[in-house]
Amino acid sequence: MPDDHEDIDRTLDAVGPRLKRLRQRSDVTLIDLAKQTGISASTLSRLEAGLRRPTLEQLLPLARAHGVTLDELVDAPPTGDPRLHLRPIPCGDGSVILPLTRRPGGIQAYKFVLPAGGDDEEPELRTHEGFDWVYVLNGTLRLVLGEHDLLLKAGEVAEFDTRTPHWFGATAAGPVEYLSLIGRQGERAHIRAVTK
C-alpha cells in the first residue's frame, strides 16, 4: 500500500501536464501567463514540463489565472465530506448575502435575503461590469432597472446587463429571498428547454 509521500509525489508530478493543458485550452502563451501571474515564462515552462515542482506561492496565482480552484489544479483527492460550509455575510442594512459558489472566476451564485423595505424608499442605482440573472424564491423583489421599476414575485426571473443602472430592494409587504447568478461581461445563464 503506497504511503502518503508517494501520493503527494504522484499528485505533484501530475500538475505540470495539467497546467499545460489548461493554458493551451485557453489559448494563452507562456509570456501572457507570466504577465498574469508574475511567474517568469522560463519557470512556467519548467513547471509544465515537470522539471520543477510547484510551490504554493506559484499554485495560487496559477489557479486564479486559469479560473479553477486549487483542489482542481492539483487534482486533490476528495475528502469524503461533500458538504459545503457556507458562511452568510450580514450587511449593515439587515440584509444577508450567502455565497453559493467557491471557485474563482466564471459565473458566481449568491442567495440574498433582504428585510422588509419601505415602498417609498429612494433607490441608489449602481452599475458595474457583468451580467446578472435573478430568480425570486420568496416575497416580492423590487428591481429598478434603468427607467423601469418592477415588482418580481416568487418564481419570476429577470436578466440584464449590469452596466444598466440597477437597484434591488424589498417592499413593505415583507422580506424577500432571491438567487443571483453574476458573470463577467458576455457570460450569461443559458436556459435549455425541452420541447415535446
Image: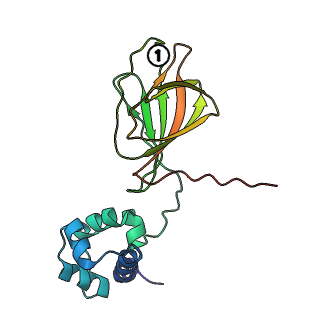
Whether residue 23 can be seen here: yes
Query: Quick one: quadrant of the C terminus?
Result: bottom right
Q: Residue furthest front?
A: 147
In the image, residue 164 lies at what x, y percent? Answer: 40, 37
Q: Residue at x 40, y 51 (%)?
A: 185
In the image, residue 167 lies at what x, y percent? Answer: 42, 28
Q: Residue furthest right?
A: 196
Location of residue 124 (image quadrant):
top left
In the image, residue 2 lies at what x, y percent? Answer: 44, 83
Please count the marks in the image.
1
Q: Return the residue at label 1.
A: 117
Whether residue 55 can be seen here: no
| 167 to 111, vertically: above or below | above
Q: Amino acid at mark 1?
A: Gly
* Secondary structure at numbered mark 1: loop
| 180 to 124, vertically: above or below | below
In the image, residue 40 lies at what x, y percent? Answer: 17, 76
Q: In terms of depth relative to the viewer, which is nearer, 119 or 12? A: 119
Q: Residue at x 40, y 22 (%)?
A: 94
Q: Residue at x 37, y 75 (%)?
A: 27
